[in-house]
Amino acid sequence: MFSSSQAQTSLSELINNAILGQDVTITRDGIAVAKIIPIAPPKEKLDIETMRALTSKMKLYPGSFVEDMRATGEL
């Protein structure tokens, strides 16, 4: 925990703590009033070829599994 006056003088340190994954609570008169928290890292982008490979295995429309079941006599 950091008091508001400590937070004013050491903002860079608090930001570095958040980068390292630590939550930082700021207090005023001993009462928690604010929190600095790390932001989740961005997800990796999915390249177009990987997306095509994934979607090529998908059915063209959602009801097609029923047709498959009917064709195999499961329904």
Image (tube, rainbow, N blue to C red):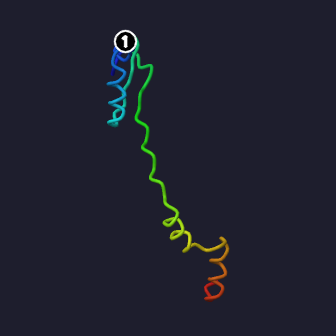
Determine whether the residue tagged by mark 1 lies in a helix, strand or loop.
Answer: helix
- x 39%, y 17%: residue: 27
Question: What residue would you read off at disc 1?
Answer: 5
Front residue of 42 and 31: 42
Nearest the eye: 47 or 19: 47
Task: Tell me where residue 73 sits by quadrant.
Answer: bottom right
Q: Is residue 62 left or right of residue 19?
A: right
In the rendered image, which quarter contains the C terminus? bottom right
- Percent of width and height locating residue 3: 36, 15
Residue 63 placement, left or right of 33 = right
Question: Which residue is located at x 65 percent, y 78 percent?
Answer: 66
Task: Relative to 41, say whether 1 is above or below.
Answer: above
Picture quarter with the N terminus? top left
Say how many tags the image has: 1
Label 1, residues with CA under 10 Å away: few <14, some 14-19, many ≥20 = few
Say left or right for 72 vs 23. Answer: right
Residue 43, image x, y percentages: 45, 50
Q: Residue at x 32, y 30 (%)?
A: 17
Image location of residue 28, percent across then percent down: 41, 13
Question: Does residue 44 sit above or below 59 in this rendering?
Answer: above
Say which amino acid is labelled 1.
Ser
Instruction: Indicate the quadrant where residue 5 lies.
Output: top left
Q: Quadrant of residue 24?
A: top left
As rendered, which of 33 and 75 lies closer to the eye?
Answer: 33
18 shown above or below 71: above
